[in-house]
Amino acid sequence: MRVLGVDPGLTRCGVGVVDSRPGRRAAFVDVGVVGSDPGASIDLRLLAVADGLETWMDRHVPDVVAVERVFAQHNRGTVMGTAQVAGIAMLVAARRGVPVAMHTPSEVKAAVTGSGRAGKEQVQHMVARILGLDELPRPADAADALALAVTHLWRPAGALQGGDRHELTPAQRAWAAAEQSARRGSHRGAPTRARG
Amino acid sequence: MRVLGVDPGLTRCGVGVVDSRPGRRAAFVDVGVVGSDPGASIDLRLLAVADGLETWMDRHVPDVVAVERVFAQHNRGTVMGTAQVAGIAMLVAARRGVPVAMHTPSEVKAAVTGSGRAGKEQVQHMVARILGLDELPRPADAADALALAVTHLWRPAGALQGGDRHELTPAQRAWAAAEQSARRGSHRGAPTRARG
């Protein structure tokens, strides 16, 4: 399975592609950034990002697109543009019939580091280690897109539906706990635990 | 000039088309709602709205698309979906080379009623009167899309660049004041005046 991770942003939208290998191993395929000119009007910026994402879809033909879930409480100044880019990533995938998954920042941190409260640098180091990269993924923004793709590959299928939890690794258990916590949070309308 | 107004929403996205006539008169063309199934996944909902907006663009070939500006502070629970639909409306227009304009709710209220604090019903009545409709536009949600289109037709061109302000009608002066207020608000990062 091939996953395209998208870390949405209007000026810099991180994109990372990862393949699954037997035994749930993850293999690096590509990483980069799709961006738009901050001086352009918002409609033309969204078009530039959409065109960039189409190019990545054409090049790598992913089986699923994993998008970071954006919360209204985060970074008020840029949150609307970020939400709009996330929406456009979902639209680009849906137009091609490619399923979309969303993961919260704390799910991603939990999946790759074992802690939903890990720092950005720790996530970057773990992504490099998981994917067997000699150095940290560049640009740094795009490491989050790779982490999203890895998170999707490693999602504990069935764990939340009463699956065999004892078969999960510690990181997968932390992932499941973070996801459950985020879901409880969203039911209350204030996913504070998902802020990570 | 033909304007397509878009009042963004994921479940119900209002759309209204208005033509300009000599002497800045506005003529009603069409009004309706583009929607998506609340039970579907978010990516398929965004696709349904995008397809619906494409159909409206095909049918009426507007010269400009006027979209309501969404603020992060509004209606937290649905604001992300609303922002994403606004982004998709802008993308659909940009793909066709149709310019996009954004107007705040208080600009719209000021343009059609003369007061940035007018109620929803007052806006509906004024839209019907301005467009010479025998009854209130239906569905009610879509009246806001017509109001947006009228607002764009009536925008006081040049007024904010030092134009002949004495030539403005009271409604147009209120519009200009609301727009300036919203701009000052957005520079502070908290467009509270634009909440109308």
Image: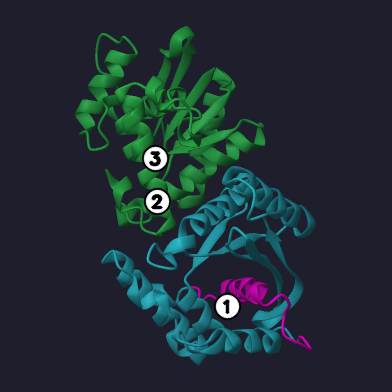
Chain colours: A green, B cyan
Q: Please determine whether, in this image, residue B149 is positioned above or below residue B131.
A: above
- Residue in the picture at 55% in, 35% down: A100
Residue B76 in the image: x percent, y percent? Answer: 42, 63
- Label 2 marks a residue whose chain is A
| Residue A67 appears in the picture as rendered | yes
Q: Are marks 1 and 3 in contact (CB under 8 Å)?
A: no
Dot 1 amino acid type: Trp
Q: Which residue is mark 3?
A: A179
Q: Is residue A148 or residue A135 the one in the foreground?
A: A148
Q: Please determine whether, in this image, residue A56 is positioned above or below residue B148.
A: above
Q: Is residue B138 magenta?
A: yes
Q: Which residues are magenta?
A: B133-157
Dot 2 amino acid type: Arg
| Residue A45 appears in the picture as rendered | no
- Label 3 marks a residue whose chain is A
- Residue in the picture at 65% in, 89% down: B125
Whole-number angstrom distance, CA of label 2 to CA of label 3: 9 Å
Q: Is residue A58 magenta?
A: no
Crowding near pointer 3: few (<14 within 10 Å), some, many (20+)? Answer: many
Q: Secondary structure at mark 1?
A: loop
* Image quadrant where one finds the N terminus of chain A: top right
Left or right, A62 with respect to B61, comes to left
- Residue in the picture at 49% in, 27% down: A157
Mark number for residue A184?
2
Dot 3 amino acid type: Glu
Mark number for residue B154?
1
Crowding near pointer 2: few (<14 within 10 Å), some, many (20+)? Answer: some
